[in-house]
Amino acid sequence: MKADFGVIGLAVMGQNLVLNVEDKGYTVAVFNRTAERTKEFVEGRAKDKRIIPAYTLEEFVDALARPRKVLIMVKAGAPVDAVLEKLFPLLERGDLVIDGGNSHYADTERRLKEAEERGLLYLGTGISGGEYGALHGPSIMAGGHREGYELVQEIFERIAAVGPEGPCCGYFGQGSAGHYVKMVHNGIEYAIMETIAEAYDLMKRGLGMSPDEMAGVFSDWNGRELGGYLFEITERILRYRDPETGEPLVELILDTAKQKGTGKWSTQSALDIGTPAPTIAMAVFARIISALKDERVAASEVLSGPEPTLGVDRGEFIRRLFGAVYLSVIAAYAQGLRQLRDATAERGYGLDLAEAARVWMAGCIIRSALLVPIRKALLEDPALPCLFLAEPFKSAWGEYNGDLRWVTCLAREHGIPTPAMDSALTFVDAYRAARLPANLIQAQRDFFGAHTYQRIDKEGTFHTDWEAVA
Ligand SMILES: NC(=O)c1ccc[n+]([C@@H]2O[C@H](COP(=O)([O-])OP(=O)(O)OC[C@H]3O[C@@H](n4cnc5c(N)ncnc54)[C@H](OP(=O)(O)O)[C@@H]3O)[C@@H](O)[C@H]2O)c1
């Protein structure tokens, strides 16, 4: 009997996806570069299941029913090319290759072309939800050959998480559209995580709250309009005690966060296409600064600053911190979705933003109650330039911007860094400013580089000899 589906790469994601697909009634062929991992899998978690192990790629390809459907779940970058180099020549016209890892969209474009030249179908597909999602229902963002998507649509719909508006998988368009949507999803994820970390820092250092007390706050917020996976896990993390010491584990963890791949790429692409994504960028930079642990420890001895104790009423601060966090989280989605909108214009993806909001409703890391009103706003106006212009976000801005100002002012006054919250505030303040000081920047550019400028009182392009005395 031939397998319905094949998976190459049996690390965390690969194994769990295989088990998820098998659980839905399909037979799955599996291959991993290191044979030991395959053996361990089929003798362990995959025992007595419709899973066919292969120890060479030839065996693997031979085990698959045609047209073959092969999902690659290996480390992003060179490993994907290493697999494709060997896999492509073994496949036949009409077979489908799906790269389910976090590949860079430019790599996906290149690989897709190569597949096309060989008469193969190719899908660059972002899969979110980590280990748990892979097994119980991830959020799947596909892009590439539409005929390829049609071949696996049924499997994807059956393994995906089910949200309030159906299975959380979707086809986003040609080329690298799927990987681009996943990349921006991860950018939003960075910004929400940083916002939550800032709220934790303000409560911990500013108010002297214990992890259990903070867990209570996150539990309350999670039940409100911004509730979602990242708030849920934050509460659980804060409540977790280290079995060895009995201490809250979070306080024993080194304060340096890694940033690699998608968060950085999302910001690089925002810069390339000229879309404003400052909160996502600040979240990436915050991780970069966190990684300078030794320098920070040394600088803490040299550079003075105010006491972090906020000295305000705890209840009032937490109440207003909610508004600050809520607006910052909206800013993260607003910027990410704006980036997708601009990428569609720039890269010709034809992305459906309301569909992205639907696919993010369950299974993925940024799933949140907010995605319901976000999708509604995007369905009402698919070309919405900024979420804050639509309800309920417009009213939320009106109701809470004073809280965001108050919280960030206090943070500035007491030397507690809140780059995501600050950038969310200044993003909206700049966006809602009918006149910004860029007139002076135009003048400066014209002064030193004769770059010319436009005027508000007449049409045309102008240059001034600024050295000449007026
Ligand atoms: N982990 C997550 O929560 C998560 C969530 C979403 C997306 N992703 C993405 O999903 C993909 C897989 O992630 P993962 O965490 O399961 O695995 P991973 O740690 O990123 O990669 C390990 C897998 O890659 C294989 N591999 C590495 N170099 C190779 C090469 N040169 N040739 C062939 N195979 C090679 C390994 O095979 P060996 O056993 O032979 O070393 C192993 O199967 C990545 O792109 C990741 O970014 C991960």
Image (cartoon, rainbow, N blue to C red):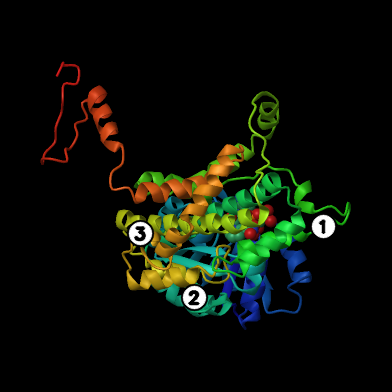
Which three-letter amino acid code belongs to the residue tagged 1?
Arg
In percent of the image, x 19 and y 31: which residue is there?
Answer: 452
Element type at mark 2: helix
The span from disc 1 to disc 3 (Cα, nearest Å) is 43 Å
Locate the N terminus and report the quarter of the image it occupies. bottom right
**Residue 209 x, y percent position in the rendering:** 73, 51
Q: Can residue 56 be seen in this view?
A: no
Identify which residue, 51 or 92, lies in the foreground: 51
Locate the C terminus and report the quarter of the image it occupies. top left
Q: Name the residue under label 2.
A: 152
Which three-letter amino acid code belongs to the residue tagged 2?
Val
Which mark sits nearer the N-terminus, 2 or 1? 2
Label 1: few (<14), some or many (≥20) within 10 Å?
Answer: some
In percent of the image, x 50 and y 45: which residue is there?
Answer: 422
- Which callout, 2 or 3, points to the residue nearer the camera? 3
Residue 241 is tagged as 1
